[in-house]
Amino acid sequence: MSQPIRIHPGNPKIFEFRGRPLVLLTATEHYGAVMNRPFRFERYLEDAAEKKITLTRLFTLFRELQSHCNPYSTCKPESPDYVSPFKRVGPGRALDGEPQYDLDQWNPEFFDRLHRFLTMASGYGIIVEVALLSNTYGDSVWSLNPLHPRNNVNGIEEIKWPEYMTRRHPRLFARQAAHARRIVQETNRYDNVIYEICNEPGGDLRAEGSPAASEVNEWLTALAGVIRETESGLPNKHLIAGQEAFAYEPWEQRSDRSFRDFPVDCVNMHPLPNTTYGGRSYDMGAFMSKQLKLRAVRDYCLATYDSPKPLNFDEDNAASQYKDFDGWTIHRKRAWTTLMCGGHYDYIDFSIINYCETGTEESRRHIRTWMKHLSEYIHSLDLVKARPAPRILRKRPEHTIPSVMAAGSEDISIYLADGRELGEAGAGETISGEAVCDLPDGDFEVACYSPVTGLYSPWSAMRGGAGARLAAPEFRHDIVLRIRRRL
C-alpha cells in the first residue's frame, strides 16, 4: 500500500495523496452508506468519482432519526435495514423492535460492506472520513444506539444521554474504545482513510449532572489515544480529524484549541452561528436556514489560515434540506469561497437516498455538476504554492464578496460572489463593474470562468502593475477572474 493521505509537506493547509496535492470536496457526504442495507453504494461511488468528488464520510455506529428540518438520508435506515458492527442475537428485543445485540460478537455483514466500500472508494481515489462515534443528541436518538443498555445483552450501565461522551461509566467507555480499536484495525490497510473521533461533540447543557465541555474534551482526548495506541502496532499511521466540544447553553462552537494543541491533525468545523476563534465570533448561518452568510464564511477561513492545521467545513448544512436552485446556489457560493480561502468543503446532498444513489436529474444538473467544476478548477492550480491573497484586490464590483487565491504572481484567481441574502433587494440580479488589482509589473492574460457552466471566456492580454483594472462582464451570483503571467 502507498503511504496514507497526509498533510502536504509543502503546504500544511492541503493534503498529499498518492504523490499529488489534494483538496477535499464533496457534495455527496453520505455517512450511512455502509449501515443502510438497501443503499447501493457502488452506484453512489461511481457517480461521485465521475463528479470529481474527492471525499466522502462514513459513520460506523451512529444512527439518526428523520425530523421536520433534517430529511431522510442514508443515516436514517429502517430498523430491519440497519447494519451494525455487532450481531443481533436476541432473544430479547431492542428498543427498535429488532433483536438485541451482543457486543462481544462482531457482525460479518457490516465488515464485508465496510471493506467493499473502502476498496471501491480507493479504486476511485476518493478519501473516506471514517467517523467512529457521534453525539447522541437526546433520548430518542440514544435509544437507537447499540450501546444503549436496553439494546444489548452485555450489561452496559444505565446513563443519561449526555454522559455518552464522557468516561464516567467504565463498561460503556470500554465498549466505545473496543469499537474504535476494531474499526481502526480493520481499516489500517487503506491509504484513503481519515479517522474522525466523534461527530459534533458537545457539552455544557443546563441540566443537573450534564458534563461540561471540558469533560467531553477529556473523553475525546482519550479516544484519540486509543487510535494512536492501536496504530502503534500496525503498519500504517492515519490522520485524525475532529474538533473540541461545543457548548450547548449558551451556544458557542469554540475552535481555538482545535487549531492548537487538541489531538487532531485536521479541524472539522460545521459553519454555524457563534463559531469563535481568536476572540471573535463568526455567524456562518443557522442550521437549515437558507442563509448565505458569505462574508463570515470567508473571514473565518482567513482568520484560521495561519494555524498549522487544515480546516474542513465538515457537513455544511445551512441550506442542504432545500433541494432547489436557491439552496444549491447558496452551497455553491459557500464552497467556492471556502476553497478560494484555503479550506476544504463537505456538503450533504439530500437528493441521494436509497434507490436514488446518484441523486435526481435536477441535482445532477445543478449542485453535483457545479461541484465537479469546482473540483476541476481548484486542482488546476499549483496548490502547493497557492495561498489566499486578499490584499491583491483593491476594488470590486458593488454587492460582491471577493475571495482571492494566488500561486505567487504567476496565477491569480479572484472569485466574486453576490453576497446578498435571499429576500434582500437585488439578490441574484445581474452584477457588473470593475475590479482593481495590485499586480507585479509585467505582461499577463485574463479570462473569466463560470462556476455554473465550467467554461472560460477567451483569454485577453493585460498589463500588470499597481492599480491594474479589469472590467468584469455581467454575471449573476458568481464569477471567477483568472489572471496568469504570460510566458
Image (tube, rainbow, N blue to C red):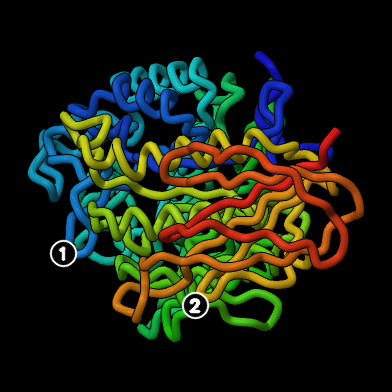
Give the amino acid at mark 1.
Answer: His
Tell which residue pokes out farthest to the right in this image.
441
Q: Name the residue under label 1.
A: 68
Q: Where is residue 425 in the image (x, y as percent from the top left)?
A: 34, 81
Of residues 349 and 71, the one drawn nearer to the viewer in this rendering: 349
Measured along the vertical axis of the image, is residue 45 above or below residue 341?
A: above
Which badge, 1 or 2, is on the more N-terminal residue?
A: 1
Residue at disc 2, secondary structure: loop
Tell which residue pokes out farthest to the left in this image.
97
Residue at disc 1, secondary structure: loop
Of residues 448 and 328, the one drawn nearer to the viewer in this rendering: 448
Quadrant (top left, top right, bottom left, bottom right) of the N terminus: top right
* Residue 307 in sight: yes
Residue at 73% over, 57% down: 388
Measured along the vertical axis of the image, is residue 189 above or below residue 380?
A: above
Q: Position of residue 226 (x, y in %)?
A: 60, 43
In this rendering, position of residue 426 left or right of residue 463? left
* Residue 178 in sight: no
Of residues 154 and 64, the one drawn nearer to the viewer in this rendering: 64
Front position among marks 1 and 2: 2
How far apart, in angstroms, are the residues tagged by discs 1 and 2?
23 Å
Quadrant (top left, top right, bottom left, bottom right) of the C terminus: top right
Residue at 25% over, 38% down: 352
Q: Residues within 10 Å of mark 1 (few under 14, many from 20)?
A: few
Q: Name the residue under label 2.
A: 283
Residue at 33% over, 21% down: 113
Q: Position of residue 10 (x, y in %)?
A: 83, 39
